[in-house]
Image (cartoon, rainbow, N blue to C red):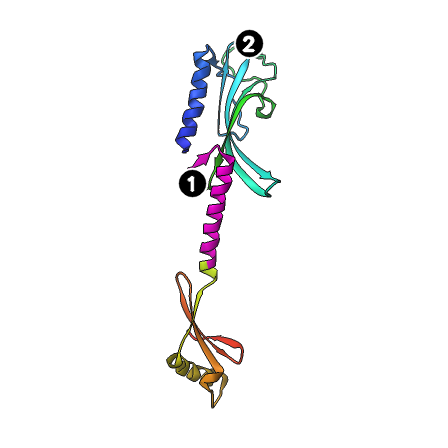
Amino acid sequence: MKKHEIEAIFTAKVQEYIAKGYTISTTTMSGHQGEIAKIDVTNGEELIRILLEDMHDWNHEDRREIEAVVLTVGRSTQKVERRARCNPFDTMYPTIWNDKLEAIEQRTFYQINRDDDFFTEDFEEYRAMQEVQLERMMNRTDRRWSPKTTELGEAAKQIAIRFIKRKLGKSRVSSKEIKVTKKEWKDEVRYYVTYFSKEYRLA
């Protein structure tokens, strides 16, 4: 499910209440409480808020974070009385608090990845896809920080012998005393020589 599909669900829910005879309450929506979007509708007797907001929570069962977008249709439990003003469209109403709504219905859209415009309502699918992404991330990290290591042969050892003699001031070095390895990262290659358990970067 994509972002635009969630917006379509939000829009359809507003239209559903309009079709029931509700009208948009233009004077109760001022002020921002961190929500993504909200629309208030009223039939003159009650005020309904269609609300879309981010959810960041912690699941104690699997000890992992939950990121989602939540669509709530809620009834205001607060008594809303317009204060006396010359302008009937004055927005000086008591604030309708999102966390005080009486939920009529609620849908949760779990976000698969912060960088992806993809959501699902199936929590098990959400967790399964997170596991796949975590494995891919770990594999990328392993490839970056755990290089492919290849031990090189006699020709490389002869080069390394000259390096060790020069670096340590040795007059004699046997090829049996050294090991030359090539380490390959994703974007870098380095050569190392090990001499009596101590490793030196060759190039």
**Residue 2 sits above or below residue 171 on the image:** above
Q: Residue at x 40, y 75 (%)?
A: 152
Rendering quarter of residue 64: top right
Q: Residue at x 59, y 42 (%)?
A: 62
**Residue 158 sits above or below residue 51 on the image:** below
The residue pinned by badge 2 equals: 45
- Element assignment for label 1: loop
Q: Which percent across, then down, holds residue 32?
A: 53, 27
**Residue 198 sits above or below residue 125 on the image:** below
Q: Which residues are magenta?
A: 116-142
Q: Amino acid at mark 2?
A: Glu
The numbered disc on residue 132 is: none
Q: Does 119 appear in magenta?
A: yes
Q: How many discs appear?
A: 2
Q: Main secondary structure of the magenta part?
A: helix
The numbered disc on residue 116 is: 1
